[in-house]
Amino acid sequence: RFRQLLVNVVIATDIFDADMKDLRNKRWEKAFQQQDLSLTREDEFNLKGTIVLEYIMQASDVAHTMQHWHVYTKWNERLFEETYSAYISGRGEKDPSEGWYKGELWFFDNYIIPLAKKLKECRVFGAASDECLNYAISNRTEWEAKGEDIVKRFVGRVKGQGKQERK
C-alpha cells in the first residue's frame, strides 16, 4: 500500500500527461463529488487520502503561483532563466520568450486555479486553501496586466548575462 501511494504521488507531478490527468479527475469525482455505495469506508478513506496527497504534491511543485505576487514573480523569473538557458544551450527546442506570457495565463486558467479550487474543496487546509486560491486568482489578474512587460524584462536580463546565441 505504501509503495503504491508513493508511486501515485510521484507520478502526480507529471501534470502534462492527459491520460493521467483524466484518471486523477475521475478519481477526484469518485472521492469527493459522487456517492459510490460499492466502496467500503476504508476504501473511501484511502481513495480520498491518496488523491489529496497527489494534489498536495502537485501544489508543492507550483506553490509559488499561489503565494504573494513577489514570490510568484521571483520563482517565475528563475524558471524562465532556466528554460531560456536550456534553449540557448541547445537542450530546449523553443525560445520560451515567444509564449511565456500567454503560457502563464493558460497555466493559471487550466491548472493552477482549478488545483487551488480542489485544495479548497477537500477542506484539508482550512483557511489556508482560501489564501492559496485568492493568491492564484490575484496573481493571474496581475500577470495579465503586467506580464508582457515582465517577460521583456526577463529577456533583457538573460541577454544581459551573455545568454544570447543559440548553439
Image (cartoon, rainbow, N blue to C red):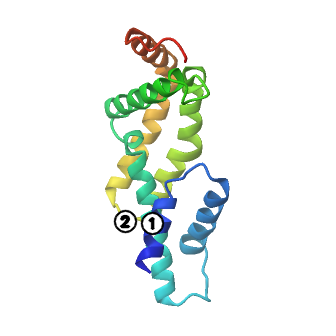
**Label 2 sits on what residue type?**
Val
Estimate the x, y position of residue 132 in percent, counting from the top left: 38, 47
Q: Earlier in the sequence, mark 2 or mark 1?
A: 1
| Camera-side residue of 23 and 139 | 23
Q: Is residue 69 above or below residue 30?
A: above
Q: Residues within 10 Å of mark 1 (few under 14, many from 20)?
A: many
Percent x, y of residue 56: 41, 59
Determine crowd level at label 2: few under 14, some 14-19, many 20+ residues with C-alpha closer than 10 A.
few
> Disc 2 to disc 1, how far (Cα)?
8 Å
Going by the numbered disc 1, the residue's amino acid type is Val
Please state if 165 lies on the left or on the right of 61 as rendered.
Answer: right
Asked if residue 144 shows in the view, the reply is yes
Which residue occupies 54% across, 50% down?
A: 114
Q: Secondary structure at mark 2?
A: loop
| Vertical side of 11 occupied by 131: above or below | above
The local secondary structure at tag 1 comes to helix
Looking at the image, can residue 122 be seen? no
The residue at 34%/29% (across/down) is 74
Q: Quadrant of the C terminus?
A: top right
The percent position of residue 162, horizontal first and vertical second, equals 40, 11
| Label placed on residue 129 | none
Pick whichever, 64 or 4, lies toward us. 4
User: Hey, which quadrant is residue 53 in on the image?
Assistant: bottom left
Label 2 close to label 1 by CB (< 8 Å): yes
Q: Which residue is mark 2?
A: 124
Q: Which of labels 2 and 1 is toward the front?
A: 1
- For the N terminus, the image quarter is bottom left
Q: How far across and how far down the image is residue 103, in percent?
A: 58, 31
User: Mark 1 highlights which residue?
Assistant: 52
State whether residue 43 is above or below residue 142: below
Q: Nearer the viewer, residue 43 or 37?
A: 43
The quadrant holding residue 21 is bottom right
